[in-house]
Image (cartoon, rainbow, N blue to C red):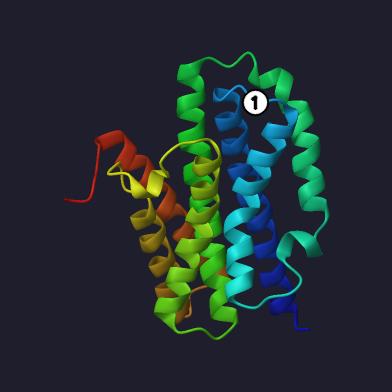
Amino acid sequence: MTTSYLGMSSMLHSIEVAGILAFASSGFIEARRKRMDVVGVFTVAFITAFGGGTLRDLLLDRRPLFWVENQEYPILIFVMSIVAIPFLRHLRNAVTENAIVLADALGLGLFSVTGASLAQEADMPMFVCVMMGVITGIFGGVLRDIICNEIPLVFRRSHLYATCAFAGCWAYLILNWLQVSEAVALGFGVGICFVLRMLAVRFDWKLPV
């Protein structure tokens, strides 16, 4: 393996871990709102953190699944589920609403761009890479909302969501095509997705009916 490949692999691994933590946090907060016990908290966090990446790996025929290959990921979520329970009890509803939006936006950006990068690594066409990134970013949240008996956020006429992931993935792939540094391309793609999502929530941006 070349040094550049190892560096990129390490970078994607770090982004993947950050995305898992962000999405797991949104799962913790949503489970707290539904007053679940520790089993419920772990289940919701696990599915939110790993749902999108699992579907991505299945579609790209990647084996073993990313969380099976890295058993420290589910172990981390398990430990966090136990530790988070006492802390979550003291959060106010207004705080949880803001926290879930922030954590979900960060997870969306991190996982979307990672998904697009892995699809590109598998020599998928550019548009397929973008869609794979969007699927990676949104599917965990879809499963979280279904389990919590909510209409998935991406299917409601709410603030821009999947559109932000779509834009972030294109930003990453275009910069990559222009041979910009991988670190810059990844960071810019994540940043575009995150900032668009937060602006959409702040200024009530929605797609037209």
Report the residue at 46% width, 26% height from top.
97
Q: Is residue 162 left or right of residue 135?
A: left
Q: Which amino acid does label 1 sit on?
A: Met
In this orientation, does residue 184 appear? no
Q: Is residue 135 left or right of residue 153?
A: right
Q: Residue furthest left?
A: 209
Residue 65: name its quadrant.
bottom right
Residue tagged 1: 36
Q: Is residue 21 left or right of residue 103?
A: right
Count neighbours of disc 1 (C-alpha within 10 A) and say few if under 14, some if 14 to 19, many if 20 or more.
some
Compared to residue 23, the image places residue 180 above or below, namely below
Report the residue at 46% width, 60% height from top.
188
Compared to residue 167, the image places residue 72 above or below, namely above
Q: Circle 1 — which element? A: loop
The quadrant of the image that shows the N terminus is: bottom right
Q: In this view, does 134 lie to the left or right of 199?
A: right
Report the residue at 38% width, 49% height from top.
154
Q: Where is residue 37 in the image (x, y as percent from the top left)?
A: 70, 25
In this orientation, does residue 134 appear? yes
Q: Where is residue 189 in the image (x, y as percent from the top left)?
A: 45, 61
Report the residue at 68% width, 45% height from top.
46
Q: Where is residue 126 in the image (x, y as percent from the top left)?
A: 43, 80
Q: Where is residue 123 in the image (x, y as percent from the top left)?
A: 55, 86
Compared to residue 122, the image places residue 203 above or below, namely above
Residue 163: name its quadrant.
bottom left
